[in-house]
Amino acid sequence: MAGQLIPITLTVNGTTCRSEVPPHLTLLEFLRDTLNLTGSKRCCGEGECGACTAIMNGEAVNTCLILAAEADGSDLITVEGLSAMPYGARLQQTFLDQGAVQCGFCTPGMVVAAQYLLMNNPDPTPDEIREGLSGNLCRCTGYARIVEAVMGAAGDE
Amino acid sequence: MSNADAHSGITHSGIIGRPINRVGGPERVDGTYRYVGDIKIPNVLHTRLVHLDCGRARIHSVDTSAALQMPGVRAILSGKELPASVKRFGPANRDRPILAIDETTFHGEPVAIVAADTVWAAAQGAAAVVVDYQELPGIYTVEDALAPGAALVQDPALRPNSAYKETNILNEWKFGWGAVDSAEADLVVENDYTFPMMTQFAIEPFTYAVEPTSDGITVYSAIQHPNYLQRVIAEFLDMPLSRVRVIAPDPGGAFGGKQHAKFEPLLAYLALRIGRPLRLELTLEESFQAARRTSAQAHIRTGFQRNGTLVFQDVEINYLIGAYEDIAGRLVAKGSYAGGGGPYRIPNVRILARGVFSNTVPSTAMRGFGLPQMNWPVECQIDEAARELGIDPVELRMKNLPEYGEVFMPQDPPADGRWAETLRKGADAIGWGKPLPPGRGRGISMGLKLGPTTGASYAIVRLHGDGSATVLAGTSDMGQGARTVYTQIAAHELGLSPQRIMVVMGDTQGVPFDLQTSASRSAVFMGNAVLRACRDVARQVQELAAEHYKADAVIVEPGTVEVGGQRKTFDQVMTDRFSKVKGEVIGSGSARAEYDETHPLNGRPAFYEVTCTAVEIEVDKETGVMVFHKLVTVADVGRALNSQHVAMQDDGGAIQGLGHTVMEQYFMDDRGRVRNLGALDYRIPTTMDTPRELISLHVENGDGPGPYGAKGAAEGGILAVSPAVAAAVCAATGAMIRELPLTPQRIWEALHT
C-alpha cells in the first residue's frame, strides 16, 4: 500500500471533492472515514444488504463494492444529499409517517434505493416496489410499512 | 410491582395511545444519527481479531514477530501471553476468557488481537500472525454432547460448584405440576421437534470502542444493557462503577444479541495495557460467530380427552448452547417453564429442560428468549390432536384457554387477559373456515411468554425553567420505540407537546440505573418509573405554585394546576417562578420487581405476553416453494401507548419468525465450521419473501401493570409463527414437518419421498 496514493476528484451531493486514496479503499470507507459522511452504513461488505446504497451517475450502487479510485470523476448522491432530490424529502417524511423506521440502520440505504426507484418509475405497483427494494435488508420492520411509505411518496413530484 | 399508579384515575386520552411518529426518526431518515460506529475517537487504534478455521483446536504457539513488523501495526496480544491475573467474564458465570488461551472452543473464537493505525493495517497484521495449532474433534450436537464418555466442552474447574461439572450439561431444570404418569388420556400425541441454529442478524454489526481516561475508562458499545456492561467491566478491571462510563448509542438492531458483553473486556484490557483508545468493528461474518439463538430439540407427549380437553403435557427439551454459559441458565429455565403449558389450562405438566454445552458459536438471548423453541412443539401437538380428534383447531384451543382471572399455572399470576378474544380476532382476520382454492392452507397458533420476573428501573425527569422537560431513562432504544412512549408519558403527565421533551439514554455517567432492556419490559418498568418521576415533578410544581403565588394550589389535570381560582399550566408556573432567579424541578421515579425465592424462577412475571398468529399460504407441490398470502398477528397489549408502534413491533416480530420458520439456519460441517457466514449464504427475509398482506392487530382491555394499563409488547409476534405455518402447510398438502426451517427442500421431500 505504501506510496501508492491515487488522486481522485468527484462530486458528492453537489460538492466537488478532491483527495488521494490508497488503492484498496472502498467508496464506502472514503465516504465514511475521509469525508465523514457516516449516513451510508456498513453491514455485509459484500453487496448483499444495501445499507451503503448511494446513487452514482444516476445508478443505485453498493458503495462497499466500489473502490474509491473507481469513483474518480463520478457524480454521487448519498443519504446526506437526499432531501435536495426530487422525491427525497417526501420519502423521508412518508417513512416517518408510515412507521417504516425502527432501529434505522438500514434506513439511509433504503430511502436512497427508494429514491432511485421513483426516479425511474414514478408510479410503481407494490410488486415493483418489492422488487426495487429487494437488495436492501431490514431486520426490524417486516417491510410492509416500507412498501407503503414508498407508495405514499410516489407520483409526480 | 404495584399497580397503584397505573390505575390512579388518570384517564387515558389525548396523546396516550396516539400513533405519533417515532421519536428519533428524522435523524435516521437523513443519516445524521450517530450509531456507535459513527463516533470518531481521536488517536484511536483500529483492531482486528485473529481466529482459526476450525471448530476446536489446541494452540501450540502464536508467532507475532512478522505481524509486528507490518507497517502501522502497534500492538498484538495473544491469549498465550495473557497473565494469569486477567479475569474471565460472563453475565452469569465468569467462564469466558477474553482471548482463547490454550484451546479455541468454537469456530471464530479469537486467539489474538492486532491493533494498528488503520483498519487496513490491522487486517494485514492479523493475516500475518502465525498460529501453530492442532485441530481437535469437537462437540457439535446434542447427541455428541450427551453421549456416554463424551469429551468435556468446559473445564470442570470453571464451575466447581455445579453438580453437572463432569458432564456437558449446564444444568437440568424440572418444572411441573399435577401427576402426568397417572393422568388418563384418550389420545396421546408423541413427537420429536427441532429448532434450528440461527442468528439475530442485526443490520448493525457488533462495534466497540474503549478509551482509557485520566479518571477511569469509557466504553462505547451498542449494548442493550449499559448498566450490566458497566458492572461487568468494573468487576473485570477492579474499578468502582463510578469510574466506568458506558456510552451506548441506540443500537442499529439488537434482538437480544446485544444484551451482554462480548469483546468490551478484551478491548478494555488492551487499551489500558498500551494506553491507547481502541476500536473494533466486527465483519458481519464475525458477528455471526459472536452471537446466535439457542437451537433446541424437543421430545413431547401430550394427552387429550376425546372432547379435546388437554390432560397432560410431558416435555423433554435440550437447548444446545455454546461453550460458555452467557445467559443460557436463565434462558432455558424461563423458556421451558412458560412454554410447557403455553396459554392453556393443563392439569398435569412435566418439563425436563437441559442446557447443553457444545463447541459452537456462543448462544445468547434472542427475541422470545427460549420460547419460540418451546412454543413450536407445544402448538404443533395441538394441531396434530385436532386432526386426530376431528376437532377444529380454533375450537380445540378455545376449549383449553383459561378464563380471565383463572389460575392456569399454580405458582403464577392468573390469566391477565381475555385470550379467547385474541384468538377469535385472529381467526376472523384470516377468514378461518371460509373456503380456499386448492393448494392453499391456513394455520393458526397461540403463543405465551412470561413478562419480566426481575426488574429495577430508575428515571429522572427535569422540568426546566422554560417549561420544557428532559427525561433521563437508561433503556436502550434499539428500534422498539422506547423514546417515543416515554415522550408520550411525559407529554401527558406534564401537559407538554412532544416537541418540548427530550429523552436522554445510553450514558451511565448521567443517566440513572436500568437493569436491562429485555423481556418486553421497558414500557412497563421504565414506563412506570418515568410516570412516577413525572408525578414527583407535578407534586413539586404544585408546592412551588402555592409558594410562588401565595395561594392554595391543586393539580386539576395532568400538567395543570389551579391556584387562587386560576388555572395555570406547568409551563406558566415554571416561567413565572424561574424568570428572574433561574432553576428547575427534578423528579425521580422507580419501578422494581422483588426477588421471590419461593417461585421456580425466583420471581413472578409482571404480565403475560399472549399472541395469536394466523397465516394463509400456498404450496407449489412440484417445487416445495411456499407463497405467503396473508399473515395476521393479534397481541394482547393491555393498553397500546402508541398504536402504530405496537403494530410495528408485531410486524417485525412476525417477519423475524417467518425467517426461522422457512429459511434461516446455520450449516455446520463435521469440523464445527459454520459454512454460511454472512448475508450471501445465510438468508433472512427480503421484500420478496414477505406476505402479500401483513396485518397486526391488538387487544386492549387496560389490564396491564404498566402506565395506563399497558403490558409489554414486541416479542409476542415471533412466538407463534412456526406452528401456524406448519399447520398451514399440512392443511395445504397433508405433510406435517417437525423440523425447522420448512424449506422448499424439506416440503418437497415430505411430499415426494
Image (cartoon, rainbow, N blue to C red):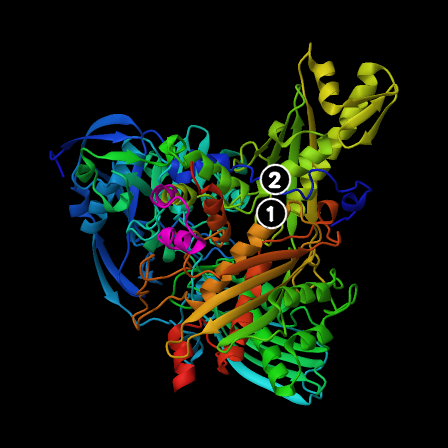
Relative depth, front residue between B127 and B536 = B536
Mark before the other along the chain sequence, 1 or 2: 2
Q: Is residue B501 left or right of residue B117?
A: right
From the viewer's perspective, is residue B672 above or below residue B311?
A: above
From the viewer's perspective, is residue B421 above or below residue B202?
A: below
From the viewer's perspective, is residue B570 above or below residue B407?
A: above
Mark 1 and mark 2 residues within 8 Å of each other at the beta carbon: yes
Residue that numbered label 1 is attached to: B644
Residue pictured at 46% horizontal, 36% vertical: A90
* Numbered mark located on residue B390 in the image: none
**Dominant secondary structure (helix, strand or loop) of the stretch shown in magenta:** helix
If the image is split into quadrants, where does the N terminus of chain A sit? Answer: top left
Q: Which residues are magenta?
A: A115-135
Q: Is residue B354 visible?
A: no
Amino acid carrying mark 2 in the image: Ile
Query: Residue B698 occupies which quadrant of the picture?
Result: bottom right
Residue that numbered label 2 is attached to: B20
Chain of the residue on which disc 2 is drawn: B
